Image (cartoon, helix red, strand yellow):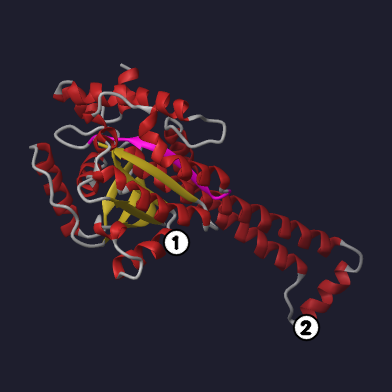
Amino acid sequence: MRIVMLGHTGVGKTTYMAALYETMQQRVEGFHLKISKSHDHSRLLDLAQMIRTGSYPSPTAQRDEYEFNLKYQGQDKFPFVWADYRGGAITEKQSNEQASLLVQDLKQADGIMMFCDCDALAKGNQKAIQLGRMTNFVGRAVQEAEHPIALAVVLTKADLIIKFEESFLLPFKSLIDLVNASQWVMGAFVPIACGVRSANVSMPLLFTLHAAVLSKATISAHLIENHYNQAQAWVEKSQGLGGFAKWVGDKWNGSITDRQMAESQMLKAVEQYKEFELIKEPTEALIQYIQKLPCIQQDKSVSSYVQELSKIHIGIKVSRSSSDSFSNYCTDPFDVFKM
């Protein structure tokens, strides 16, 4: 599985990755995260500690790529590669190496995290204007998609705004239409806050991975059914008219008999079922968790998205302003409605 993360300079991508990694060293709905290289593990945790003291990392200087494993209940389940692009790649010509890599990565991605600054959207400053070029990049990937993709529109610095307005989402109107028109792409708006106290940081990653995870489970279930049906067909063939004579002939010539073919297909079905069982529970847990989000759907108006985002915004505000003991357990803004 492959994730691409992009956003303008200063939007908080590196801050997000560090805050997310620290948060998901503990289990979130049974999931936690590990990075393959030990020095990246140490660096991200060190960055997270700096962020919690109010010291933020410098903007990404170049495209970086990381290998992660999403674990469930302590077991490795879903390995993935995460490509992090520096903000300048969005504004450069597509002939530039970084911009060309971004176009290729977006086409091949299983998940896309598109980072947007809520504070910039509220103020309508130059950072918000760069959104047009970013939505063009992502929009092309959505239009050309031929495999399942999850697109998370990650709204950073949600704690800095007073409230969500419909005007914030107008720059995304064309992208919403493209997602609704695509048979392959699922999208959602995901507000987050990263800093001394972070909130909702696990949701963008889990949403972005879910399309590939669901696709993997669906393909596995289809293969089980296919192998089983083929096994049944070979059994019926072996029992049909002339089945015994054919069995004698196959044995005499050293050929594989119909019954052996049936057994072979059944073994494949059993092996595939074992693989399916390994991912069935985490897939179901993932789908249930992300249903909390304002997912892009054809029957929704902009005001509907604003209402859903406002509810999450309340949770982010409460979790950010509460005591340390509360925020340690309630990094998910939906937790405040359970207390």
The answer to which of 331 and 306 lies nearer the viewer is: 306
Q: Where residue 333 appears, x then y in whole percent? A: 30, 27
Q: Which mark is residue 108?
A: 1
For the N terminus, the quadrant is: bottom left
User: Most prominent secondary structure in the magenta stretch?
Assistant: strand
Kindly report which numbered mark, 2 or 1, lies closer to the viewer in this rendering.
1
Q: Earlier in the sequence, mark 2 or mark 1?
A: 1
Q: Where residue 213 appears, x then y in whole percent? A: 47, 49
The answer to which of 143 and 232 lies nearer the viewer is: 143
Q: Is residue 206 above or below residue 163?
A: below
Res 171 quadrant in image: top left
Q: Amino acid at mark 2?
A: Asn
Q: Residue furthest bottom?
A: 253
Q: Where residue 81 appears, x then y in whole percent? A: 34, 58
Q: Which mark is residue 253?
A: 2
What is the span of residues highlighted in magenta in the rendered image? Answer: 183-193
